[in-house]
């Protein structure tokens, strides 16, 4: 049975031809009638995936402690804007605010804002943050944030922002589209040759036929707006996501449903559709807008350098062996390597409004 989103996609293809991958991704995720994020509860064991804040409170505690330290390094501005974009269920901000109680002056100066485009998710976040120590305000766009110094966090935001794909063919580099095959199924097609080769990274001509390059102008636009804001008002931003530190060639488009990978064409709108984040392109966009990116590091290095192992030990002290094992497993998932570890696949980018050193960034 064809769902609402697939029917819409098929009508558009029949009317105007194959869709760019970015348009297909946007419809699957954000269509107001059947899009994944507008109609489903994606997070947690009963959803389709689990984010770092849902794995353990330790993640949000370390991010919160980092934000307090950074605020002090910035000269303790008061007031300042504490913002999270794409807050999920509100778990990360809840843990940040609880941890920030280590410095009451930080909480007194903070003005909390959550940037969320989904009314449904904003309602979930309000429930999570109902007992937060500070009043929280919601906005749908970065431009809706009030003026002033900014401390900004985004965890697993950019991977869900639509991406364009280009494929190397016998005709040269072409934009990848989604169309309808002779068998009636959705599939990929190569569109007309790319008119602007400057979109491609170096060594594009050396790539083998079938190579894929992913370009996400919408992600770069967010990074650029963030860069302008930091350059004008001061502050720092912490961007955490899975991806690569350097631009390169790969097909990373993927779909996840019920914690399993499925085809990106399987029931459009019913699965989370993402691609790996190109952190080099984010840093370049922010730098061009006036911000100062610090070198990208892995999530594992970020968490372990800031005391994840010590925090896990403290949480486990006095608990039974089963509870200590759960805490150890959570720490290993957050910072470990391998198939189930997030420590190497996930990267952390820090942006600042002015040049400054912030640990653990080199």
Image (cartoon, rainbow, N blue to C red):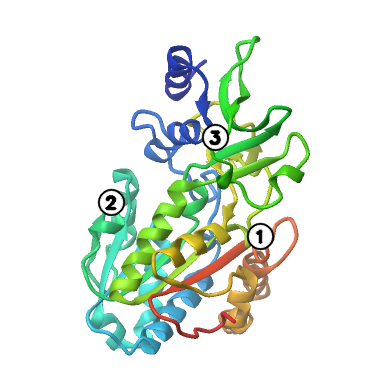
Residue marked by disc 3: 195
Residue 158 x/y as whole percent = 48, 53
Front-most of residues 74 and 123: 74
Is label 2 in a helix, a strand or a loop? Answer: loop
Q: Is residue 353 left or right of residue 9?
A: left
Q: Residue at x 53, y 36 (%)?
A: 271
Please tell me which of labels 3 and 1 falls first in the chain.
3
Q: CA distance from mark 3 to mark 1?
A: 33 Å
Q: Residue at x 40, y 37 (%)?
A: 30
Decide: is 195 above or below 351.
above
Image quadrant assignment for residue 98: bottom left
Residue marked by disc 1: 345
Whether label 1 touches label 2, CB < 8 Å: no
Q: Residue at x 64, y 60 (%)?
A: 246
Whether label 3 touches label 2, CB < 8 Å: no
Label of residue 247 in the image: none
Res. 265 visible in picture: no
Q: CA distance from mark 3 to mark 2?
A: 34 Å
Residue 34 x/y as whole percent = 40, 29
Decide: is 176 above or below 212.
above
Q: Residue at x 35, y 83 (%)?
A: 101
Is label 1 in a helix, a strand or a loop? Answer: loop
Image quadrant assignment for residue 317: bottom right
Q: Quadrant of the C terminus?
A: bottom right
Q: Is residue 159 left or right of residue 95?
A: right
Res. 65 visible in picture: yes
Label of residue 140 in the image: 2
Is label 3 in a helix, a strand or a loop? Answer: loop
Please tell me which of labels 1 and 2 falls first in the chain.
2
CA neighbours of label 3 inside 10 A, class few (<14), some (14 to 19), many (20+): few
């Amino acid at each position: 049975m064809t769902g609402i989103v697939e029917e819409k996609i098929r009508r558009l293809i029949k009317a105007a031809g194959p869709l760019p991958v970015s348009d297909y991704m946007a419809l699957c995720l954000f269509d107001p009638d059947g899009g994944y994020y507008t109609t489903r509860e994606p997070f947690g064991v009963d959803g389709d995936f689990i984010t770092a804040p849902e794995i353990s409170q330790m993640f949000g505690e370390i991010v919160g402690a980092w934000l307090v330290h950074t605020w002090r390094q910035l000269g303790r501005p008061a007031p300042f804007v504490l913002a999270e974009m794409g807050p999920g269920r509100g778990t990360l901000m809840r843990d940040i605010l609880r941890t920030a109680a280590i410095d009451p002056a930080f909480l007194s100066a903070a003005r909390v804002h959550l940037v969320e485009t989904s009314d449904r998710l904003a309602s979930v976040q309000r429930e999570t943050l109902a007992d937060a120590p500070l009043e929280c305000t919601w906005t749908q766009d970065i431009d809706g944030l009030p003026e002033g110094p900014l401390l900004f966090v985004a965890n697993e935001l950019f991977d869900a922002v639509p991406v364009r794909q280009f494929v190397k063919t016998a005709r040269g580099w072409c934009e990848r589209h989604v169309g309808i095959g002779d068998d009636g199924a959705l599939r990929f097609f190569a569109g007309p040759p790319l008119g602007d080769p400057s979109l491609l990274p170096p060594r594009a001509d050396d790539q083998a036929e079938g190579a894929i390059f992913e370009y996400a102008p919408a992600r770069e636009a967010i990074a650029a707006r963030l860069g302008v804001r930091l350059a004008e008002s001061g502050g720092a931003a912490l961007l955490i996501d899975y991806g690569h530190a350097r631009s390169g060639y790969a097909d990373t488009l993927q779909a996840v449903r019920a914690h399993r990978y499925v085809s990106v064409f399987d029931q459009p709108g019913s699965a989370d559709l993402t691609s790996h984040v190109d952190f080099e392109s984010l840093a370049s966009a922010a730098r061009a807008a006036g911000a100062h990116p610090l070198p990208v590091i892995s999530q594992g290095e970020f968490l372990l350098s800031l005391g994840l192992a010590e925090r896990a030990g403290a949480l486990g002290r006095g608990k039974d062996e089963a509870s200590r094992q759960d805490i150890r497993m959570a720490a290993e998932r957050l910072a470990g390597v391998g198939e189930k570890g997030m420590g190497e696949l996930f990267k952390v980018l820090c942006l600042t409004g002015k040049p400054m050193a912030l640990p653990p960034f080199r």
